[in-house]
Amino acid sequence: MDILFKTLLLIHILGGICGLGATFASPYIMKSARTVKSAFTAHMVNAKVEQLAKAGSIALLLTGLIMGFLHPYLFTTGWYITAIVLYLVTQPIVAYLLPRYDKAMLEILKTAEGEDLPSEYIRIAKKTVPLNLAAHVLLILLVFLMVFKPL
């Protein structure tokens, strides 16, 4: 049982590295776009990074819950319950809202003329800033809870 738990913990940590790292990298990739061509490239790279984030995020959830079922006392600890709630609050932002804006931005790029980024593209990109900030704060809180288990 101890080997199973430690294996799950290893997968959980690797999932965190993939999922959280990719989530933190995404806004920096997207900010690098200065022209229509570089924006298309940024979206392409970001799509690959998002695949890693999704896989890591799913691994985090599954391994976290399985570890909870292996050690049911975790479901009575504040840090564990809070971490699950924060995870569930973060998911609509990173799995629904941000991809929706990405899709809208790509549609704008497809009809763009010239190399300058369209103003509508820039306007939508600015809308993602508070969402990315919220996701980053929530993810930092999640990591804090998992490392320090303060509650």
Image (tube, helix red, strand yellow):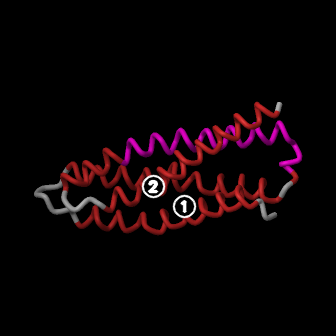
Q: How far apart are marks 1 and 2 (CA)?
A: 10 Å
State whether the magenta stretch is mostly helix, strand or loop.
helix
Q: In the image, what residue occupies the spot 35% across and 63% down? A: 125
Tell me, yes or no, whether the highlighted magenta stretch contains residue 5.
no
Tell me, yes or no, whether the highlighted magenta stretch contains residue 69.
yes
**Looking at the image, which is closer to me, 11 or 22?**
11
Q: Compared to 134, does 64 lie above or below?
A: above
Amino acid at pointer 2: Leu
Quick check: marks 1 and 2 in contact, CB under 8 Å? Answer: yes
Q: In the image, what residue occupies the spot 65% across and 53% down? A: 87
Secondary structure of the residue carrying tag 1 is: helix
- Residue highlighted by disc 2: 98
**Looking at the image, which is closer to me, 95 or 146?**
146
Q: What stretch is highlighted in magenta?
A: 46-75
Secondary structure of the residue carrying tag 2 is: helix
Q: In the image, what residue occupies the spot 29% across and 66% down? A: 122
Image coordinates for residue 39, horizontal then vertical, percent: 25, 54
Q: In this view, does 16 lie to the left or right of 72?
A: left
Split into 4 quadrants, where in the image is the N terminus?
top right
Q: Nearer the viewer, mark 1 or mark 2?
A: 1
- Residue highlighted by disc 1: 135
